[in-house]
Amino acid sequence: MIHKDHPRYESLRLRAKIVDAYKNGILADSGMIAHGRGEAFDYLLGEQSTENAKLAVEAAAAALLLAEHPIISVNGNTAALVPDKIVELSNELDIPIEINLFYRTSDRVLKIEKLLRDHGAKTVLGTDHEKKALIKGLEGPRSSSSAEGIYKADVVLVPLEDGDRAEALVKNGKLLITIDLNPLSRTAKTSSITIVDNIVRAIPNLIDTVINLSQTDKVTLHQIISNFDNKENIQSSLKKISKKYTGEDL
Ligand code: PTJ
């Protein structure tokens, strides 16, 4: 039991969720290591959504609202930390969710599917019993995707994706939106829109922004996307981190 007065309460609460998800078979063992790396970057970002993250969220919301076949990709860490918010976003946009695991096992897929359905998910793709299609440029099980999901999608929201897959998805013509606390990761640098923020803040921000922009005309939404420069946005996040690192903002 973590006491609410603890100065690191929020961080410890997330750790407890991660550990529970590992014990329940949702999270890969490497998912705990990935979370630790994320924690370090989050600490340097001040554990709050930056202005850059908010700009990226706005561009992401516009892209999702304009898309013809958008999809939300979910892995173990996302399912562990924000299953309710992923379902809320999917229902708000009326778009499917695809289970897309780096360390894929049938058991984890079944458990994540049940978790999402228990939270009210309508369409969950990426299970073992549906038509698969291969993503060009990837080898082995990592090339597999749902024919009706990621394969067909024009816009893919994929938190914590691995670099190879992110590169292949972009090469296959997808507009890729990622959420990654590490602005230097290959995924962050490859994606069309990178939200450098913790998924526990980024997904709720995305829901609010989708609701706020839902009545906005298409021309304005296109403008939001064209005004957004991913490289510039990542560079600003790095500047924020380096200020913290050198103690400039003490
Ligand atoms: O559930 P699976 O089988 O698909 O496996 C998922 C993991 C995350 C284990 C797998 O994709 C992996 O090994 O990822 P990496 O290469 O370790 O990358 C994870 C990235 O996510 C790192 O750049 C972390 O900084 C970042 N990250 C970790 N936690 C969060 C995060 N970004 C946003 N929010 C977080 N909570």
Image (cartoon, rainbow, N blue to C red):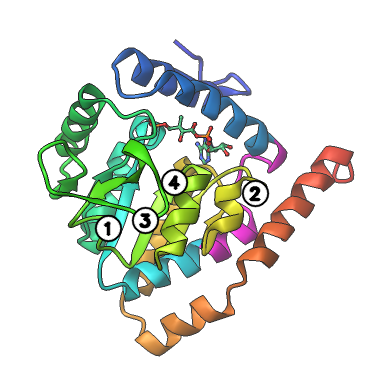
Nearer the observer, disc 4 or disc 1?
1
Give whichever of 195, 206 is nearer the camera: 195
In this rendered view, identify the residue nearer to me: 57 or 73. Answer: 73
Of tags 1 and 3, the one toward the viewer is 3
Circle 2: element type: loop
Give the distance between the C-alpha atoms of the residues marked 2 and 3, in whole angstroms. 26 Å
Q: Say which residue appears at 15% left-offset and 34% top-offset.
A: 118
The residue furthest bottom is 219
Q: Is residue 212 something one can see in this rendering? A: yes
From the viewer's perspective, is residue 81 above or below residue 90? above
The amino acid at mark 1 is Tyr
Residue at image point 37% right, 24% down: 27
Disc 1 to disc 3, C-alpha distance: 10 Å
Q: Which mark is residue 136?
A: 3
Q: Which residue is mark 4?
A: 159
Marks 4 and 1, the one that precedes in the sequence: 1
Name the element at disc 1: loop
What's drawn in magenta, residue-wise?
Answer: 44-56
Which amino acid lies under the numbered mark 2 shown in the image of this protein? Answer: Pro
Among the two numbered marks 4 and 2 on one chain, the one whose residue lies closer to the N terminus: 4
What kind of residue is marked 4?
Pro
Mark toward the start of the polypeptide (1 vs 2): 1
